[in-house]
Amino acid sequence: MKISSCGNSLSLHRIAFALVLTVTAQAGIAQRPTDDSLLLSQDHEQSAATTRFVADLWLNQDHVSGLPNNRDNLNRSRGRLRFGMSGVFGTNWDFTATARIAQGSDDNLDNRRNNDNERSDGIGVDQVLLRWHTSEMASLQFGKAPLPLDLSPMLWDPDLRPAGIAYEHSFAMGDIDRLHLVAGYFAGQHLYGDNSRIATAQVAWRWRDGAPTRASATLSWLGFSDLGELAHQGLGRTNALANGAYVSDYRLLDMQLAAHTDWGNWPIDLQLDVVRNLGADFARDGARLSLSAGDHRQPGGVQFGVAIERIQREAVLAAFNSDDWWFHSNMHGQLAWIAYGIDRTWNLRLSGFRELRDGLDQPTHRLRLDLNADW
């Protein structure tokens, strides 16, 4: 369902206003009960306590210059509100159900050529997730939700919501080491009637999990199939196409190495990600290195970060990795950011990108300002 950008359209101001009303209503529900409410049964009170309102708001200002083919600079504003309910029932089940509203100064017709993973204007289902905790260390989930794998933006955009089934299991290895396994099968549910399928498996070794100094090694495999509609709808992007179809298959083998330590009051994170597409016989490798210092999730906290990426043309499936970067493959580039935690709800991030697509001499520059809130 598309929201018009004029007339009686839903503006960003109305999104924010609706959010304020919703949060206010929830706050009223959470207030101390009246005398009449004390007549409710204890069982009902316990049931209500297990369900809570959840929401997140994203507002973005985007400027892109140096676009290929002498295209004019891009300037646009976008916003997205996701809201709904999350809770537990019984002793082993939890659920999440959320909707999504988005509005942008650009049009949905621009999303293909802007390499976006979501429509600028729209209303729809964000999550419908049911999870069964088969034990304290294992769970089985069903539905439409974020992909339950730990992947870098080079492989996957965390805003995407595939639908499927996944099983997770953790094993304690000694006092604080842990082995974590995930396997799943999903329908991609990208834009324009996508009917892709994604088989996934991941194993992670987490050394000193939760300690101030810790590290991890994560090996992942993603196999994509039924990609014809993606190519037909123009989401092939920087991957190689021939006669309207992908030239390569996409069977990605990915290795991530990560380390964390606290230097005084500054948490330091270093991550290296390397990927090879086993379904391609050319231009099939990619790498990402990132370093950050600080924590913007704390009130008044600041985070600085840098990242570099080199992604050959067939290394990843360009329809599904992060659309924060303008080019999704066949490129190399650098990112620098600074983020600030306004309070426990709101944070602000300023990001600058410099990207060069293979075969071009002029880099593309992108400047993004993001305001985020989580309830």
Image (tube, rainbow, N blue to C red):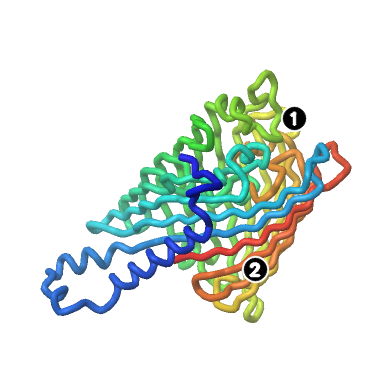
Identified at 78% across, 44% down, the residue is: 72
- Direction front: furthest residue: 7
Residue 135, by quadrant, is: bottom left
- The amino acid beneath tag 2 is Ala
Against 198, residue 354 (above or below) is below
Against 203, residue 187 (above or below) is above
**Residue in the foreground of this view, choosing between 2 and 346:** 2
Residue identifier under label 2? 339
The image's mark for residue 227 is: none
Badge 1 element = loop
Against 35, residue 327 (above or below) is above
The image's mark for residue 282 is: 1
Q: Which of disc 1 and disc 2 is earlier in sequence?
A: 1
Identified at 53% across, 33% down, the residue is: 192
- The amino acid beneath tag 1 is Phe
Identified at 61% across, 37% down, the residue is: 109
Q: Which circle, 2 or 1, is nearer the viewer?
A: 2
Q: Is residue 255 visible?
A: no
Identified at 68% across, 64% down, the residue is: 350
**Residue in the foreground of this view, choosing between 371 and 144:** 371
263 with respect to 361 (left or right): left
**Label 2 Cα crowd, 10 Å radius (few <14 / some 14-19 / many 20+):** many
